[in-house]
Structures are given as C-alpha cells and as structure tokens.
Image (cartoon, helix red, strand yellow):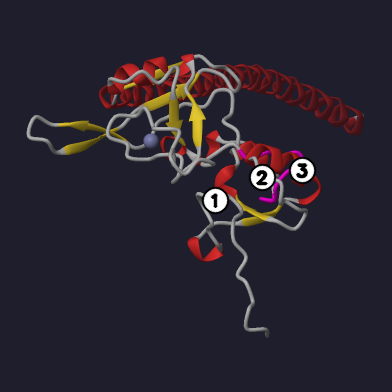
Amino acid sequence: MSANFRKKKCIVSSCLRSTDDGVKLHRCGENHQEIGKALGKSNITKNTYICSLHFEPSCFSRKGGLNPDALPTLLLNADAPSVKQCDVPHCPNTDAHVVFFKGRPAFAAVGNEIGADLTKGWICGEHFEEDCVDDRGRLKAGALPTLGFVTEEPDGTLTQVTVHTISTSQDSTVDLILSDDVVADIEDDCKDLEVRAENNKLRLELQKSQEKLESLRKTVKLLQDDLVSKKRKIDHLEAELRIANKAARHFEVRIVNE
Ligand SMILES: [Zn+2]
Ligand SMILES: [Zn+2]
C-alpha cells in the first residue's frame, strides 16, 4: 500500500472523526451538493465522508444507512459543540453523546413527578425504553420517558426514581403516571379479584353438579316406584296363573275319571 494512504474521516471541520472514534462514516452520495450547502463547503463530492453524529435519527434508514435526502444539522459548529442539553435534572447528556427528542405536552405528568418541565425543550434518548422508538428512530406517539430519573437527597447523594406508566390504549397519548405504592395496591386488588373470580367459577360449577345430582335422584326414585308397581302386578298375575292351573288340573282329573 502507498505510504501516503489517508484514513477516511468526517468532513465537518469541528469533528474530523474516523471510524476509530466509534462513529459510522457515510458517503455524501447524490445529495452531496445539498450537504455542501448545509456545511457551507464547496469541496464536497459524492465520495466525501460525513459521520453519523451530524444527522437526526430520522435521517437514517432502517438498516442504518443515510436516507438519500438526509441533511446534516447536528454538531456543525466548533464553537458550539453541543446545541442540546437534556431537560431531565442531573442528566449529563448532550447531543454529542446520544440522540435527543423534542419535549411534548404529554410528558407534563412525568415532568411533575421529577420536578422538571419536559414539555418544550429536549430530552435525551436514554430516558426512553427501546420500544418507544420506531424503526426509523422517531419517538412513537404514546411514548413516555421512564428511565434514568434521579432525585438529589439533602446530603447530595443521588437516588434512582421509578416512574410507572400505563398506556390507556395503544395509540393514545393519554397516560397515567403511577407511583410504586399505587402500583402495589393495584396488583394486590388484581390478585384479590382473580381469587374471587376463581371462587365464583367454582361455586357455579358446584351448583350445576348439585342440580344434576338432584335430577338423577328423582329419576332413580321414579324408576324404583315403577319397579315396585310392576312387581306387584307380576305377583297378582302369578296368583291368577296358579288358580287357573289348579282349575285346569281339576277338570283334567274329572275327564280321566269318566
Ligand atoms: Zn463528524
Ligand atoms: Zn438525559
């Protein structure tokens, strides 16, 4: 290989990162002129490299490639290496580290829980479960931040805060924010209800069985009564048969003696 082999690196002057810095490099491709305009540079070609740090999550395809019309908007100025600061208290993240999402009115209740306004500014991606983000890196409609919340104790130590969210329907933006205690109460109630429902089911089955037993008993009684009356009839007919036999023999004897 030639001695003046040049390592691939990001064209953004304030960045110049290579893959060694843990970034992914993308060719500017067909959109190179627009990207050049966005960077204020005239020397951008199809084969110029730019790293993934300069693009919003929505600029990437499902496979992680750059969309054909993607334009760099992040970390373009050396004097302002970070444009976004996370609104979650004590979160050190800037958009140099992780992806960011815009605050939403729907985050108000979570914000109240942790003493911050999360409705307008920026929140970093570390406060969202993985399934809050769609295939294209965008935050889903009903998504709520639930992770990485801490409170500061009077002695200055930080402790983790858990925020539970229950989505009232799949694509609803109305959500309930519940504390640990409330969740525990609800879980207890659910268990009670389950036990009660199971008992009710068993009671119903028992009642059905008892009714069936009762009806079988009645049938047996009817059949037994019938049997008794038929036996009596048989006895009666046997008695008549005996009398008739006796009479027949009497007449036979008389016929022989003539
Ligand atoms: Zn870069
Ligand atoms: Zn954050």
Q: Which residue is mark 2?
A: 41
Q: Residues within 10 Å of mark 3 (few under 14, many from 20)?
A: some
Q: Which residue is mark 1?
A: 13
Rendered-image quarter of ligand 2: top left
Image check: 159 left or right of 110? left
Q: Earlier in the sequence, mark 3 or mark 1?
A: 1
User: Quick one: SS at disc 3?
Assistant: helix
Q: Quadrant of residue 8?
A: bottom right
Mark 1 near mark 2, Cβ–Cβ under 8 Å?
A: no
Question: Which numbered mark, 3 or 2, is in the foreground of this view?
Answer: 2
Q: Which residue is mark 3?
A: 33
- Residue type at the position of mark 2: Lys
The quadrant of the rendering that contains the C terminus is top right
Q: How far apart, in angstroms, are the residues tagged by discs 3 and 2?
A: 9 Å
Image position, residue 78 (x, y; %): 47, 44
User: Above or below — where is 41 with respect to 257?
Assistant: below
Magenta highlight range = 63-72
Q: Main secondary structure of the magenta part?
A: loop
